[in-house]
Image: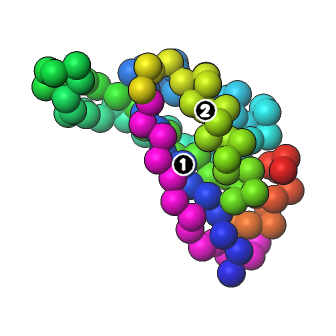
Amino acid sequence: MPDISVIHTSVASEADASQLADELIRRRLAACVQITGPGRSFYRWQGEVTHEEEWHLTIKTTTAASLQTRTWLETHHPYEVPEIIWSTCQGTIAYANWAGDVVEQ
């Protein structure tokens, strides 16, 4: 089965999430971006325990475009140290073919 790269990140507002999602699709770096939220994130930042409301993005792209997509995201993400994590997942042939058709590689 073909592989798909799934990238996860989060941002502080729905507007930031929508802007990133829109640009990833317009630039053909992602086949699909799902936004969920808001959710609560708890983490340590600059020595303090922090909890913030965040919006989560699940970005689906091809494995061939994954590095370019992550690099663009890191450059354009509003956070100083963004969460950008990814995995390779198996997908159906039809979904992988569709992703390959809409993502530039």
In the image, residue 61 lies at what x, y percent?
Answer: 68, 52
Q: Secondary structure at mark 2?
A: helix
Image marks 2 and 1: residues in contact by CB distance under 8 Å: yes
Q: Nearer the viewer, residue 17 or 45?
A: 45
In the image, residue 86 lies at what x, y percent?
Answer: 51, 53
Magenta-drawn segment? 82-94
Q: Counting residues from the N terminus, which is met first, the one under dot 2 or under dot 1? A: 1
Q: CA distance from mark 2 to mark 1?
A: 10 Å
Q: Residues within 10 Å of mark 2 (few under 14, many from 20)?
A: many
Taking 102 as reference, is 96 above or below it? below
User: Which residue is under mark 1?
Assistant: 7
Q: With 40 as the anchor, is 63 left or right in this view?
A: right
Residue 63 badge: none
User: Which residue is under mark 2?
Assistant: 73
Q: Residue drawn at (61%, 25%), measured in percent from left and top?
A: 75
Q: With 100 as the anchor, is 90 left or right in this view?
A: left
Q: Residue drawn at (57%, 30%), measured in percent from left and top?
A: 74
Q: With 86 as the anchor, is 21 left or right in this view?
A: right
Q: Residue drawn at (67%, 47%), measured in percent from left and top?
A: 67
Residue 4 part of the magenta segment: no
Q: How many marks?
A: 2
Q: Residue furthest front?
A: 47
Name the amino acid type tagged 2.
Leu
Q: Quadrant of residue 25?
A: top right
